[in-house]
Image: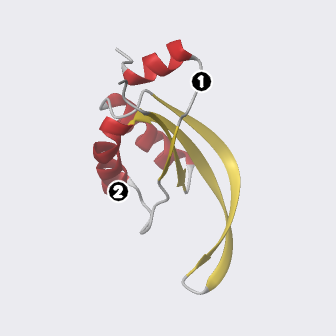
Amino acid sequence: MPDTVLLCYCTCPDAASAQALAGALVGEGLAACVNRIPAVQSTYRWKGEVTTDSEELLLIKTTASRFAALKERVLALHPYELPELIAVSVVDGHAPYLDWVRDPG
């Protein structure tokens, strides 16, 4: 059975930290691709206060077998005290693309 492809969501406070994280994950072979979406507005409750910040959203394409190492790296490199990292299983898609995510070469 092929390795499950995951789409992971992670927000970063700015372009520099997003680029550093994306570069590390792809460069170290933990992700096949990371898309950066700038100027996402996030509203959330943190330490009793409702806050709105501009962030950069990362869409990280990886596999279930690489997720534990990817998570460890995100937690080591991320500037937030409590970084967002959510992984969603991909249930279907363009098979050649999903195969590439599994083995980007």
Quadrant of the image containing the N terminus: top left
Mark 1 secondary-structure assignment: loop
In the rendered image of this protein, does residue 70 appear above or below residue 77?
above
Q: CA distance from mark 1 to mark 2?
A: 29 Å
Tell me the residue at 67%/74% (across/down): 51
Residue 7: x, y in percent? 52, 39
User: Which amino acid lies under the numbered mark 2 shown in the image of this protein?
Assistant: Leu
Residue at the spot of label 2: 75
Q: Pinpoint residue 84: horizontal percent, then vertical percent.
A: 50, 58
The disc placed on residue 74 is none
In the image, residue 57 sits, relative to residue 75, either above or below, namely above
What residue appears at the point 53 percent right and 35 percent down from the top-left corner? 90
Look at 35% across and 50% down and name the residue there: 71
Look at the numbered disc 2 and give the secondary structure of its residue: helix
> What residue lies at 66% left-to-right and 44% top-to-bottom?
38
Whichever of labels 1 and 2 marks the residue nearer the N terminus, that label is: 2
Question: Which quarter shows the C terminus?
Answer: top left
Which residue lies under the disc numbered 1?
93
- Residue 19 is situated, as x and y percent measured from the top left of the image, at 48, 40
Q: Position of residue 9 (x, y in %)?
A: 54, 48
